[in-house]
Image (tube, grey):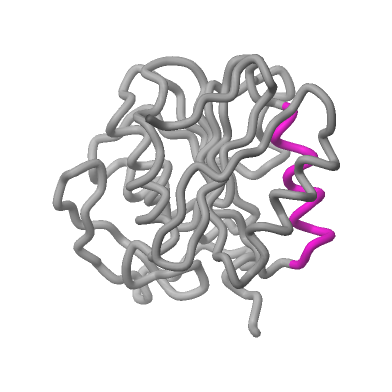
Amino acid sequence: MPQEHYFSSKPADPASLRTVSVKLAGRDVEVRTAGGVFSPDHVDVGTRVLFEEVPSPPSTGHLLDLGAGWGPIALTLGLESPDATVWAVDVNERALDLVRRNARSLGVRNVSAALPDDVPEEVRFATIWSNPPIRIGKAELHALLRRWLPRLDDDATAWLVVQKNLGADSLARWIAEEFGEGWRVERAGSSKGFRVLAVGRERGLLSPG
């Protein structure tokens, strides 16, 4: 399967931009997308499941959308938590360009679209919401999670949505084994062929409900 949508390095040519109507944070909005990013024509099913299953994000602090694409998660976090700082992180420059365009057009001023190395090392996150790029392969995915999950605040939770038939349960087992004592991973929800995993330190992990 082509992997361009994860690794494209160039912003979209203006002629290739398209306008899509979507619902974010309970609002009907129009966003700009383009080829070469994940799910350019709609909010994908996994992300919709994530929105349905997670509690409201923290109102302040640093919030992370890991693997932002054109920005549905980051924009939702920005709209729901206007006093927080939202980091939309992706390796795809085209995706980051789209996040910036969409944040401007929606008047969302608290979203910073950034390459991984551009997020200051001292930043810690009050939550992570992610539809992680499973198709990059296990080694790359595991490296991604090793890098970012430890940057959660002590009392924070990461919410990951993963398709069941693409290894949601095996990923949960790997996280539990990799991070070990002091960490928990729970199945927080399951819908439409996806699992939502809640990951955090023992003293901070919160499950919905």
Give the dominant element type of the magenta stretch: helix, strand or loop.
helix
- Tell me which residue sits at (34%, 29%) in the image: 56
Residue 83 image offset from top left, x and y in percent: 34, 17
Q: Image quadrant for the N terminus?
A: bottom right
- The front one of 147 and 87 is 147
Asked whether residue 148 is drawn in magenta, I would say: yes
Q: Using the image, determine if residue 129 lies above or below residue 85.
A: below
Q: Is residue 208 left or right of residue 102?
A: right
Q: Using the image, determine if residue 18 lies above or below residue 25.
A: below
Q: From this viewpoint, which residue is outermost toward the bottom?
A: 1
Q: Quadrant of residue 116?
A: top right
Q: Is residue 48 left or right of residue 176?
A: left
Q: Image quadrant for the C terminus?
A: top left
Report the span colored magenta: 137-150
Residue 136 image offset from top left, x and y in percent: 71, 67
Asked whether residue 32 is drawn in magenta, I would say: no
Q: From this viewpoint, which residue is outermost toward the left?
A: 28
- Tell me which residue sits at (52%, 22%) in the image: 62
- Tell me which residue sits at (24%, 36%) in the image: 107
- Tell me which residue sits at (39%, 28%) in the image: 57
Residue 138 image offset from top left, x and y in percent: 79, 62
Residue 20 image offset from top left, x and y in percent: 24, 66
Q: Is residue 30 left or right of residue 132?
A: left
